[in-house]
Image (cartoon, rainbow, N blue to C red):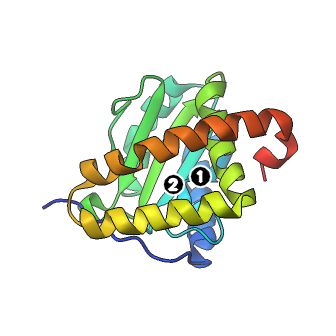
Amino acid sequence: MAQHIIVTDYCPQWARRYQEEAAQLQAVLGDNCIAIHHIGSTAVPGLAAKPIIDIMPVVQSLTAVDSAQAALTHLGYEYLGEFGMAGRRYLRKGGDERTHQVHIFAWQDTENILRHLAFRGYLRTHGAERAAYARLKKALALQFPRDIESYCRGKAEFVHRTEEKAMLWAQQYPHKTLR
C-alpha cells in the first residue's frame, strides 16, 4: 500500500509529540547525542503539514548510531541507513502511515544541519513564504493523495528556492536560525 498523503492545518500537539519522541531518542543515543531538533513542517507554527514529526539528532559518531540500531528498532523505528543521502542515518516509524521520521547527522555535517535549521527558521519568520508553502502542499496532497514521489517532486522547486533564501537569511540572522 502506498503512503497516504494528508496535509492538515498546524496542530499545537505536534510540539508535544516531538518532545516525547526526542526524549526517547536522547535516552537511546545517550552521550553520543550533542543536540536534537524538531525540523520540517510540523516544527513551524502556523504551517500546514503532513502530520509526521521530523526529528534531527546531531551526534558525535554515526558509527555509534549504527551500533544502537537494535535499541532504535525497539522504539518502533525502521532503520534505513543513509537512505539516499550520504552521511545521514534515516529512521521512520509507522510504515506507510508514518508518524515520525528521524534524520541523524554527525556534528561535522554543518551544511545539512544548517540547511534544515535555516529552512525551519526562515519559514517561522516569513509569513508569506509559509502561507505559499502551505497552499502548495495542500494542492499537491489533493492532486497526488497516494503518490509521495510526485508530491515531493511538486515541492522540490519551492523547497530548493526557499532553502537558498533561508541560507542567506541565516548568515544575516544566525541567532534566529536556532529558534
Q: Earlier in the sequence, mark 1 or mark 2?
A: 1
Location of residue 25 with respect to 29 vertically, above or below = below
Q: Is residue 56 above or below residue 38?
A: above
Return the residue at label 1: 39
Q: Quadrant of residue 70?
A: top left
Q: What residue is drawn where x is 51% and y is 38%?
A: 160
Dot 1 falls on a residue whose secondary structure is: strand
Is 103 or 127 nearer to us in this picture?
127
Quadrant (top left, top right, bottom left, bottom right) of the N terminus: bottom left
Location of residue 165 by image quarter: top right
* Label 2: element kind: strand
* Residue placed under numbered mark 2 in the picture: 54
Task: Check residue 67 in the rendering and tell me which mark sits there, or answer none.
Answer: none
State the residue at coordinates (85%, 41%). Answer: 173
- Between 24 and 121, the one lying in front of the other is 121
Give neighbour class at mark 1: few <14, some 14-19, many 20+ (Cα, 10 Å). many
Relative horizontal placement of residue 149, taking residue 120 as reference (left or right): left
- Asked whether the viewer can see residue 52, the reply is no
Q: Check the image and report above or below for 140 versus 81.
A: below
Left or right: 68, with 166 as reference point: left
Instruction: Name the amino acid type tagged 1.
Output: Ile
Residue 174 coordinates in the image, percent (x, y): 83, 39
The reply to whether callout 1 and callout 2 are in contact (CB within 8 Å) is: yes
